[in-house]
Amino acid sequence: MTGRHAQRRQPRVHWLFLGTLYAAIAAALLFQGWTAHEVDAAEARRPCVTPAPRVLHEAGPVLRLSGGSVKSASMPARTVALTFDGGPDPVWTPRILRLLRGQGARATFFLLGSEAGRHPELARRILTEGHEIGLHTYSGAVLGSASPSRAGIELALNQKALAGTAGVTTTLLRMPGTTSVDTLCGAEWQAALRAGGAGYLLVTADRRSVEPSKGVVRQFDQSEAAYRQVKGLLQGRDADRFTTVTAGLGIRSANTPAPPTQRMQGMALTWMDTASHAVADWTLWVLAIVGGLGTLRQLLLVVFARVHVRRLGRFRPGSPWLRGVDEPVTVLVPAYNEEVGIASTVRSLLASTHSLLQIIVIDDGSTDRTVEIVRNLPDPRVTVVRQRNAGKAAALNNGLARASHGIVVMADADTLFEPEAIHRLIQPLAHPAIGAVSGNIKVGNRRGLLGRWQHLEYACGCNLDLRMLEVLECMPTVPGAIGAFRREALMGVGGVSEDTLAEDTDLAMTLWRAGWRVVYEDSAIAWTEVPNTLRQLWRQRYRWCYGTLQAMRKHHRAMLEVGVAGRFARRALTYLTVFQVGLPLFAPVVDIFGLYGALFLDSAWAGALWAGFLGLQIACAGYALRLGGERMSALWALPLQLLAYRQLMYLVVIQSLATAVFGTGLTWQRIRRTGTAVEQWGGDLTNQALRRDEDGAAGKRGSRRLGPGHGQLAPGQAVPDVVPARRRPHA
């Protein structure tokens, strides 16, 4: 394939980058959930179903469990081993260290690996001031409640965290949720046996009833209450020595220097823990912002659509009356290999109630029977112009140069026009400030699931988005399928630009910057064929999105302009940037967090949140279908659309941005026509229209009767000299 329709290999490296990025986000959330006991929860202690073994009834607080044997030890008389669980705490750990230093005392700190990673300077200070460090697991998980695999991971990560922050490893372990030896019951005893088999020296504590003069291991947390208790104990006269566990037992210190490899692993773990917390906090903010913007957008769409409907249906005293437009019209139909549907498109145009037509089909270097089919249509109003393959914009300019009339309608070669579509489409051009009019596009081949999804998308886009954009006077595009233009406006801006692949969006923005207004005519209906495979859909939306980005880049300086152009740019480009580019970029992150919340957080809360958003989407889509005169039965496909179709559209935006960033040129990517829209709707729209009687009765399908408030003609009604103005451009 040559010319503008040739395809080039698109950038693929960004998919690896994006896959890695989203996988990293998912991994960070899982790690954060794991440390917060949301994944494989082990925060609460299980009730003991069996008592502690008898061998522990007379055992001391320090246990060595190996080879099935139980050995215990206690502190000598008048010796107190001070132990602190958890932390390091940025508030109380420094105060406790100052208190111990002032009294010349030493202690053992059983640290959490996650907290040591957040406060590495305190972990190092503990060692520097002569104290001892033990393990309290990485996240504070109760080992008896955790799975054996998690228990092993908790201890291993705790060791790595200490190696990365304090540069040591340790053999001391204080199991979370345990105090004296008789608390090692049930599942805790099994966890203690596994830890002892791994070589750890388990440290519990003596009961509070045991006097310090007999020698005890005292257990404290790191809080204000613990600070007061330790201060009172140090100032008492019941003990002569306050020291660490190993020093009190007279054995070698449990802390040994960590090897360099383990230190590096610990530093990486600390960085990952910090990053996971940051990612979790960031995704919460993203979820709140994206959810809020999405909800606000849906509500604004309905509100502005309602305003648009009321404007059209309400007569305002003092409104100007404009003469009905009944001028000849030139219809431009660019075509490239459109043999499947070109005949139906041209016949639907010939069947128009607006009979003063010049139809120019511009063949853009087709290699099929497109030209032959058009030339065989027996109507002098149809002209075929051939050119070498140069793209749609060049084809439209070629046809524009041959246009004989002051009003130009542009149509795609796969589009079927309703009989009254052209006449209704050109009526807003009665106002001299309006340079272009967008029509209403409906999906013809909507029977499959993919077709229904696109049908819902088009219905919401035309009946909600376009109405809102017209009310806000910032409509950024006139779809190539059906749009009307003043020829003088087109010629004044140099015709259709070939700078972007979204020539319709580029043209609309150019007209706004030239001082013209662009409006929407909802009663001018055309039926189009949408892609019926995911591959074809991807190619089409990829080109649309990339072309829109090109147009936004081309016209971004209009944001600083004054008057109509500046107002349009600030509204339209902001809307496109936020809702068409920004939200799709962050939406996958929200989906990842939503899935994480449903699986590991409060599933009822996550389900209620999703159901609420789905309900809002259904309500808005239902209103859009009602405005478009469509059946509500299509709403059943909406939940599936949110789960699958929406993700595809997000990826399209990401792919388009990657193409723009990497600077890879994208050429026109044409979808393969199948004629399914013609098969489903074309016969009724064209054949019945061609057979209509002298009264101008429209066919059974596709034509709508509008009330007098719309200022439009009923079938068979003569064109009046004047019709009520439907719009007054704002000052």
Image (cartoon, grey):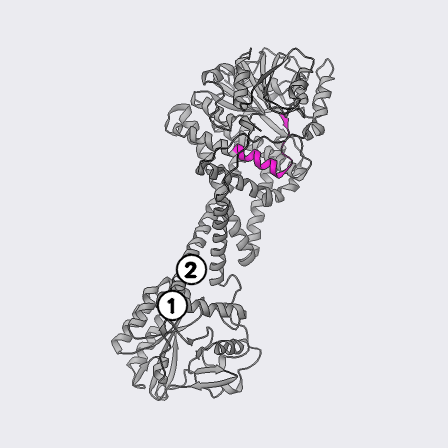
Say if mark 1 contacts mark 2, CB within 8 Å.
no
Q: Nearer the viewer, residue 281 or 659?
A: 659
Classify residue 159 by image quadrant: bottom left
Classify residue 422 by image quadrant: top right
Q: Amino acid at mark 2?
A: Asp
User: What is the x, y in percent for residue 546?
Assistant: 50, 34
Query: How many circles with numbers are drawn on the protein?
Result: 2
Q: Amino acid at mark 1?
A: Ala
Determine if residue 666 is in view.
yes
User: What is the x, y in percent for residue 497?
Assistant: 48, 23
Horizontally, residue 699 falls left or right of residue 497, namely: right
Say above or below: 586 vs 560: below
User: What is the x, y in percent for residue 198?
Assistant: 48, 76
User: Which stretch appears magenta?
Assistant: 526-544
- Disc 2 target residue: 273
CA gap, disc 1 and disc 2: 15 Å
Q: Residue furthest left?
A: 102
Residue 527 part of the magenta-drawn span: yes
Classify residue 624 by image quadrant: top right
Residue at image x 49%, y 87%?
57
Residue 120 part of the magenta-drawn span: no
Residue at image x 53%, y 87%?
54
Q: Secondary structure at mark 1?
A: helix
- Disc 1 target residue: 163
**Is tag 1's residue or tag 2's residue first in the polypeptide sequence?**
1
Q: Secondary structure at mark 2?
A: helix
In the rendered view of the protein, which quadrant contains the C terminus?
A: top left
In the rendered view of the protein, which quadrant contains the N terminus?
A: top right
